[in-house]
Image (cartoon, rainbow, N blue to C red):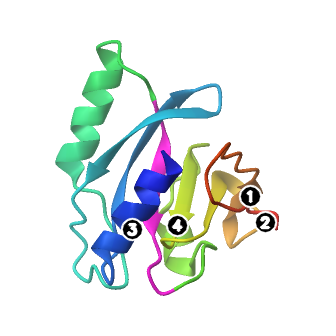
């Protein structure tokens, strides 16, 4: 699955791509690409609210719950930006950031180590190219 997301990131460059991660018990089992409706998609992302509403509805109707979100940083860093931190709710959901080559996972929390919003979490990608946020 990570390889698929990396391909989406490469195909979407130089714009940021984004989407929703679904799963249970800290394990991502599916994703859904979403339209990036940010005013400047070269530097920011905003998941289309219609995609979020549909995902919440699907979860309520018995589908996999939303585990978190993904987006790309086509220009490089897989660390959250200040803008990411400012827009992230401290809801415990995961944020996966990828750049077409590497990836890192983050936990959105109230008093995170990064910008007071994110803590690094281990990204276990069996058989996929990626890196942990701790590396």
- Disc 3 secondary structure class: helix
Q: Residue at x 52, y 66 (%)?
A: 98
97 left or right, relative to 112: left
Is label 4 or label 2 in front?
Answer: 4
Is label 3 or label 1 in front?
Answer: 3
Nearer-N-terminus badge (3/1): 3
Which x, y percent locates residue 113?
Answer: 78, 66
Tag 2 and tag 3, C-beta contact below 8 Å: no
Residue assigned mark 1: 119
Tag 1 and tag 2, C-beta contact below 8 Å: yes
Note whether 99 is above or below 69 in the view shown: below
Residue span colored magenta: 66-75
Nearer-N-terminus badge (2/3): 3
Give the CA distance from mark 1 to mark 2: 6 Å
Nearer-N-terminus badge (4/2): 4
Tag 3 and tag 4, C-beta contact below 8 Å: yes
| Displayed quadrant of residue 130 | bottom right
Is label 1 or label 4 in front?
Answer: 4
Q: Main secondary structure of the magenta part?
A: strand
Note whether 11 is above or below 15 in the view shown: above
Q: Residues within 10 Å of mark 2 (few under 14, many from 20)?
A: few
Numbered badge on residue 67: none
- Disc 4 secondary structure class: strand
Is label 2 or label 3 in front?
Answer: 3
Q: Residue at x 51, y 60 (%)?
A: 88
Q: In front: 125, or 53? A: 125
Q: In front: 117, or 104? A: 104
Numbered badge on residue 9: 3
């Amino acid at each position: 699955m990570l390889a698929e997301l990396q391909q989406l990131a490469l195909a979407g460059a130089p714009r940021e791509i984004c989407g929703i991660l679904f799963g249970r018990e800290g394990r991502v089992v599916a994703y859904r690409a979403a339209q990036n409706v940010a005013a400047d998609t070269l530097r920011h992302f905003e998941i289309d609210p219609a995609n979020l509403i549909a995902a919440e509805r699907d979860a309520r109707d018995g589908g996999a719950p939303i585990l978190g979100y993904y987006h790309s940083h086509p220009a490089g860093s897989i660390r959250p930006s200040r803008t990411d931190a400012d827009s992230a709710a401290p809801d415990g959901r995961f944020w996966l950031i990828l750049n077409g080559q590497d990836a890192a996972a983050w936990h959105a929390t109230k008093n995170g180590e990064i910008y007071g919003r994110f803590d690094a979490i281990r990204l276990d990608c069996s058989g996929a190219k990626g890196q942990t946020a701790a590396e």
